[in-house]
Image (cartoon, rainbow, N blue to C red):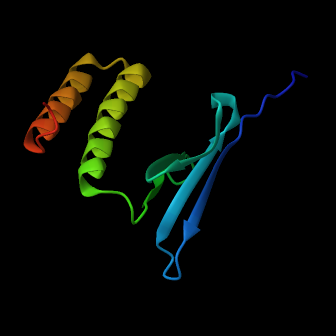
Amino acid sequence: MANTITSKIELNVELDENRVPEKIHWTAQDGGITNEEAKAMMLAVWDAKTQETLRIDLWTKEMPVDEMKVFFHQTLVAMSDTFYKATQDDKMSATMKDFCDYFAEKLELKK
């Protein structure tokens, strides 16, 4: 029997009395990340039994709207890259990239 390798990613969220995130810290030892602070996070996991995506989207009170716009843009670009790697679908990947460019243009993110 082969040895199983396990990699752990840990998220810690500090909440205020109304359960609103105040601080987010994450650790991914294999990636060299130890208790780093983040202002926002998006996590999506696929539930094969229910055929649904389960999501956790959190951001702290300190996350400025202008940074949130950049965070969304970069996430959309990364999703289009991942979509291509997973599917090799050139046409849809290009369409997704076009939308990312449109998104950035409308939010005036491109300089």
Residue 38: x %, y % from top left: 49, 49
Tell me where residue 81 sits by quadrant: top left
Q: Quadrant of residue 2?
A: top right
Q: Is residue 35 above or below residue 17?
A: above
Left or right placement of residue 70 versus residue 109 in this view: right
Q: In which quarter of the image is the C terminus?
A: top left
Front residue (pair 44, 71): 71
Which residue is at the front of the view, 33 or 91? 33
Q: Which residue is drawn at 58% across and 52% down?
A: 25
Q: Where is residue 15 in the image (x, y as percent from the top left)?
A: 54, 71
Q: Position of residue 94 (x, y in %)?
A: 20, 22
User: Which residue is at a point 49% across and 66% down the rendered structure image?
Assistant: 22
- Residue 53 at what x, y percent from top left? 46, 51
Please state the total of marks drawn on the protein image: 0
> Which quadrant is the N terminus positioned in?
top right
Camera-side residue: 100 or 89?
A: 100
